Amino acid sequence: MANIMIQKDANGYVFYMPKRDIEDRIVSMEFDTPAKWGGEIKLGNGGLYFIEPQTAPARLPYSVRAKRIDGVE
């Protein structure tokens, strides 16, 4: 599992992994409601990560642990 940061801009969510300096747009998120947020997230480069579903963060940017589902980076 890796520590990542998720922020939001005018075009949607942005994924950032500081340890590897990876930054990419999140093209889909399994859950994106105030009550349930996270799950499987897909990046613009095709990478898949999993964030344990939780209530939506009160503010962004937000740091959370994510598990890589595939080998794309």
Image (cartoon, rainbow, N blue to C red):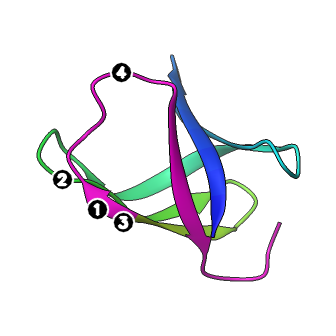
Q: What amino acid type should be assigned to the residue bearing mark 4? A: Arg
In front of the other: 30 or 66: 66
CB under 8 Å between discs 3 and 2? no
Q: What amino acid type should be assigned to the residue bearing mark 1? A: Pro
- The residue sitting at 79% across, 74% down in the picture is 72
CB under 8 Å between discs 1 and 2? yes
* Label 2, label 4: how far apart the Cα atoms are: 15 Å
Quarter where residue 29 is shown? bottom left
Q: Secondary structure at mark 1?
A: strand
Which residue is outermost to the right? 20
Residue 5 is inside the magenta segment: no
Image mark for residue 53? 1
Image mark for residue 52? 3
* Label 3, label 1: how far apart the Cα atoms are: 4 Å
10 Å neighbourhood of mark 4: few (<14), some, or many (≥20)? Answer: few
- The residue sitting at 55% across, 63% down in the picture is 66
10 Å neighbourhood of mark 1: few (<14), some, or many (≥20)? Answer: some
Residue 55 is inside the magenta segment: yes
Which residue is outermost to the bottom? 70
- Where residue 18 appears, as percent x and y from the top left, is 79, 42
Q: Secondary structure at mark 3?
A: strand
- Where residue 45 appears, as percent x and y from the top left, is 76, 59
Q: On the image, numbered disc 4 is attached to which residue?
A: 59
